[in-house]
Amino acid sequence: MARSSAPSSPAKEPGRMKQMGQVFQMTRRNDKAALPLMLLWTILPVVAGILLAAFLSAGNIIGQVLYVIAGIMGGILGFLLVLGRRAERVAYRQISGQPGAVGAVLKSALRRAWQAGEMPVAVSPRTQDAVYRAVGKPGVVLIGEGPKSRTKRMLDDEQRNVKRIVPNVPVHIIHVGPDEDSVPLEKLPKSITRIKKAISKAEVYAVSNRLNSLSKASSLPIPKGIDPTKVRAPKPR
């Protein structure tokens, strides 16, 4: 009688160090400036710790050891911070220009004070150009994904819709696309958060809930292109 084969065990996810190694290799290959910056911010704190140990704790062994350890820990922290920032930038560059990229960034990069998601509020079935909406203390921000010549009309329509629903809330427009004066995808979160604040935190939730409940376009599906849940580069800890 033939033996039944044992069920194959599910593949294990890579460990933390292996994930960090994969992120490092991906970042180093796609960002030439990443490695020099990581080395610089690793070496500087270590050198600073050694100099402080030599000049401020001369003859004090315990003090010297503590300064050196602090320098090493600072170097590790500097390496991880630079790696996380550069890896995130590389990830954004890799998805730039794909349908749904703006939604992925809004979902993963904006803070909790903002009400935004990966779902577009308007989308062109033919070109896959889309308009996304974020609500925060600056008011309502509409982001066009695609060339200005194709997204301007959708943005104007959505702006009129927003002003009809919440007439006293400021509306800001940002373009993300191939045009020279458009905002690069990697700079989108910073461009949004730099807008001057105009409403309170409580008003943010009230505006967001009102727009979601009254806007018929909020049920549109995300354009086919990328999986926004998999776009965020793993952040080493």
Image (spheres, rainbow, N blue to C red):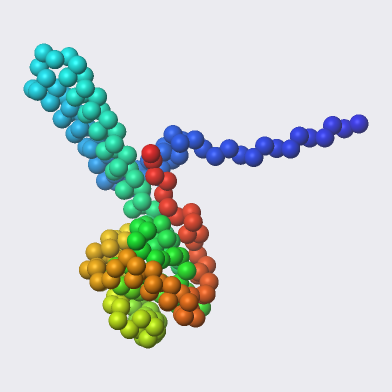
Estimate the x, y position of residue 157 in percent, counting from the top left. 39, 85
**Left or right: 139 with respect to 150?**
left
Task: Judge whether residue 102 can be spotted in this image.
Answer: no
Q: Up-down: is 114 above or below 124?
A: above
Task: Judge whether residue 40 can be spotted in this image.
Answer: yes
The quarter of the rendered structure image containing the C terminus is top left
Nearest to the observer: residue 81 or residue 117: 117
Estimate the x, y position of residue 158 in percent, counting from the top left. 39, 81
At 49% across and 56% down in the image, what residue appears? Answer: 229
**Left or right: 22 with respect to 141?**
right
Nearest to the observer: residue 40 or residue 33: 40
Estimate the x, y position of residue 12 in percent, counting from the top left. 58, 37
Q: Residue furthest right?
A: 1
Q: Up-down: is 9 above or below 228?
A: above
Estimate the x, y position of residue 210 in percent, counting from the top left. 43, 76
The quarter of the rendered structure image containing the N terminus is top right
At 84% across and 32% down in the image, what residue appears? Answer: 3
- Residue 202 in which image quadrant: bottom left
**Left or right: 120 with respect to 190?**
right
At 25% across and 71% down in the image, what residue appears? Answer: 198
Nearest to the observer: residue 185 or residue 237: 237
